[in-house]
Image (cartoon, rainbow, N blue to C red):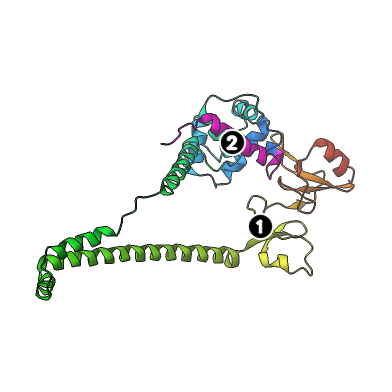
Amino acid sequence: MLNNTLNEDDYKEAVRSKYEKEKDGIYSNYLGTPSQANLRDLCWKIFKSGNTSEDDLAVYNDFFKFEFDGKNENTSPSYTNSFKKLGKFFRRETKPAKIDTINFAAVLVDFEFRPFGKFKKYYNNDQKNSEEENLMDEPKAVVEPELERSVINDVDRSQPNNLNDEIGFIKNPESLNFVGNVKSKFFEKLFKKSKSTIIITLVMFFLIGGVIYFAFIKKHCMQWSGDHYEEVSCDLEVQGIGTYISVEPLDERVIHLKKIKVSDTTTFFKNGEAIIWYAKVGDRVEFFTTHGRHPENNKPLKPVTQYIIDKYVKQKE
């Protein structure tokens, strides 16, 4: 029997654990300090990417009570205040009572087994499979081969012990049916074994084919090229000579990151939010079009501030 102890508290802890990993990841600028505005901006970035599933769109609808509209970015106070309880949940200041809030938090940290129904179904099935494997390991009843011999011996004893009667036994239709049944069962077992062998062979074929495809054919990587990323062959990382910037696995979230030159006429803010990001490199500052990490020193990029503009941009003019 399954131990049905999996509940919403388990789901909450799983989502929080995923947050602890992601807050220092690619979206650290949003999740490192989970303010209402940061979570709102992360929400729009995720849903405007077009990679959200039907489940995620349904979670958005359940949380806000209206459907996502990517054409009209909502920055109203009432909309922004909706993210307050999410920030408190990530900071362990409160435990939201509604499962809709946890499901939406799971979307923001890209928790794989979301929403809660999928989480519960997955882990219950995992537990059920474990129990079935344990049952398969239990000793099974052994069918003794004496059964077949006893039947044959019973038939033999029913016939007179002479050559003519033995020939008569072979010609007996009922005896022939018995032998035919034994052969039929033998070939039936042989067919089942052959069928299992074919299935296993096909599975191995597809697994090996998949490994070959992803290991030797589908090799998508990227490399920083001065002021932007370029898609390159993963084979470049083994060339050594002439390769100064490491080759990384292709990441769609940062492939469009670009380093830009700015001036006092550059638009740094939109609706009060920074749209230019920066990182300090020695005694200078480099500016980028979006968040992420510096491609060369791996430092987290930070949203630009008026102080940085006054000190490093206007000073050059």
Image coordinates of residue 241 in percent, x first then y, are 79, 70
Image coordinates of residue 103 in percent, x first then y, are 53, 34
Q: Residue 249's quadrant in the figure?
A: bottom right
Which of the two residues, 57 or 161, is positioned nearer the viewer here?
A: 161
Q: Which image quarter holds the N terminus? A: top left
Q: From the viewer's perspective, is 161 left or right of 208?
A: left
Image coordinates of residue 146 in percent, x first then y, are 27, 59
Name the kind of residue labelled 2 in the image: Val
Disc 2 element: helix
Which of the two residues, 111 or 205, is positioned nearer the viewer here?
A: 205
Q: From the viewer's perspective, is 85 left or right of 239?
A: left
Residue beneath label 1, please? 249
Q: Nearer the viewer, mark 2 or mark 1?
A: 2
Q: Residue furthest front?
A: 161
Find out whether residue 35 is within the magenta segment: no
Q: Is residue 203 above or below residue 27?
A: below
For disc 1, the neighbor class at 10 Å (few under 14, some 14 to 19, many from 20) is some
Q: From the viewer's perspective, is 298 left or right of 163?
A: right
Disc 1 element: strand
Find out whether residue 14 is within the magenta segment: yes
Which of the two residues, 183 or 79, is positioned nearer the viewer here?
A: 183
Residue range in magenta is 1-29
Q: Residue at x 31, y 55 (%)?
A: 143
In primary-sequence order, the first of circles 2 and 1 is: 2
Q: Is any part of residue 66 visible from this angle? A: no
Name the kind of residue labelled 1 in the image: Pro
Q: Residue at x 17, y 64 (%)?
A: 178
Residue beneath label 2, please? 15
Q: Is any part of residue 279 visible from this angle? A: yes
